[in-house]
Amino acid sequence: MQTVEDLERRLAEPSPGLITDLAALDGDLLVLGAAGKLGPSLVRLALAGIAKAGTGATVYAASRFGSPGSEQALRDAGAETVVADLTDERALAGLPDAANVIFLVGAKFGSYGNEADTWHTNCYLPGRVAERFAGSRITALSTGNVYPLVDVASGGADESTPPDPVGEYAMSCLGRERVMTAVAARHQTPLALIRLNYAVELRYGVLVDLGQQIMAGEPVDLSTGAVNVIWQGFANEVTLRSLLRADVPPLTLNLTGVETLQVRDLAQTMADRLGRPVTFTGTEQPTALLSDARRCRQLFGGPAIEVDELIGLTAGWLQAGGPVHGKPTKFQRRDGKF
């Protein structure tokens, strides 16, 4: 993968499992938050999968489309775009009806100091969306941040671990889950809640963060000494495939890699691939934000690209000066302030 076009094609390659599941879905698909960090690649994957499934379903991509060219890019890919600010009740009511809805809207970065708007976006708005699409199948993106920090040796929090979010961003995301679950129960709306951390591709994610720090000669902070990561293409696939498994009460699913990865080892391997030295600061703490994704692996298999290959691809991308999104994950934060 040497160009953005190569990367986009790889992200949009549907697996046989995805094609089978999309063939079994009735009705059109509406992606809310389609121009965000995850949305464009998910929309393209849905378009490719539906084309191969042969259902003829329409993929609607709804967003404010604040970035120049973002709407046209998805329209060129084959999506029906809808320019809408979902906080406007009239815009929400005017969205196309769809039997299948993916909800990607959320506020994380900049949430510290802007808590009221964060709760409005992450908690109130999802409830309004659940009311608007009562009776549709809905998959809503959540986050592993709803869990407490757990022992690094534990294997991560699984879906039975009681939520104990750290900070208002994480609390508002748990609020999203609770509100959508309540509305879905009232209307018997099939719902899936996807607790994701951390998706990576060559322009964004933990591996990009580490690579950029190493290339800039900055020390890597080891305070958060362990992470999970997952290829973005697989995260998109699971998000789409979960529509078929949405239920009442909702399917709740951790979406990440099954390995607990040591940040020190990741940084050293990245530095070796980059041919650069790496220095460290801080001391590994006994706890970290980690999720147990074995249930996801049982349901959907594993990603097409595993961690070691991702490190090599990311190093090559950064060395070649490939574009990045410029949105650090801040995975090192332990206080929940984003």
Image (spheres, rainbow, N blue to C red):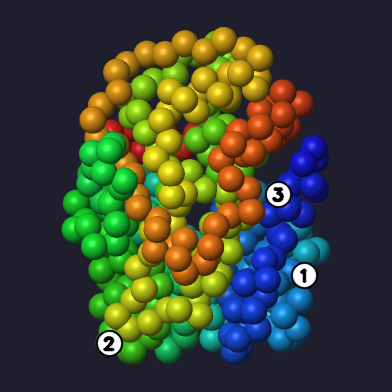
Residue drawn at x 35%, y 53% is 292
Under mark 2, the amino acid is Arg
Indicate whether 6 appears above or below 125: above
Q: Position of residue 82 (x, y in %)?
A: 64, 71
Give the number of the disc on residue 78.
1
Q: Position of residue 142 (x, y in %)?
A: 39, 59
Disc tally is: 3
Residue drawn at x 65%, y 57% is 41
Indicate whether 306 appears above or below 21: above
In the rendered image, the quadrant that contains the N terminus is top right
- Say which quarter of the image contains residue 96: bottom right
Residue drawn at x 68%, y 71% is 16
| Label 1 CA crowd tier, 10 Å (few <14, some 14–19, many 20+) | some
Residue drawn at x 76%, y 76% is 52
Q: Nearer the viewer, mark 3 or mark 2?
A: 2
Indicate whether 297 appears above or below 21: above
Mark 2, residue position: 186
Q: Distance between the Cα atoms at labels 3 and 2?
A: 40 Å
Q: Secondary structure at mark 3?
A: loop
In this orientation, which residue lies closer to the viewer: 332 or 70? 332
Mark 3, residue position: 68
Indicate whether 72 appears above or below 330: below
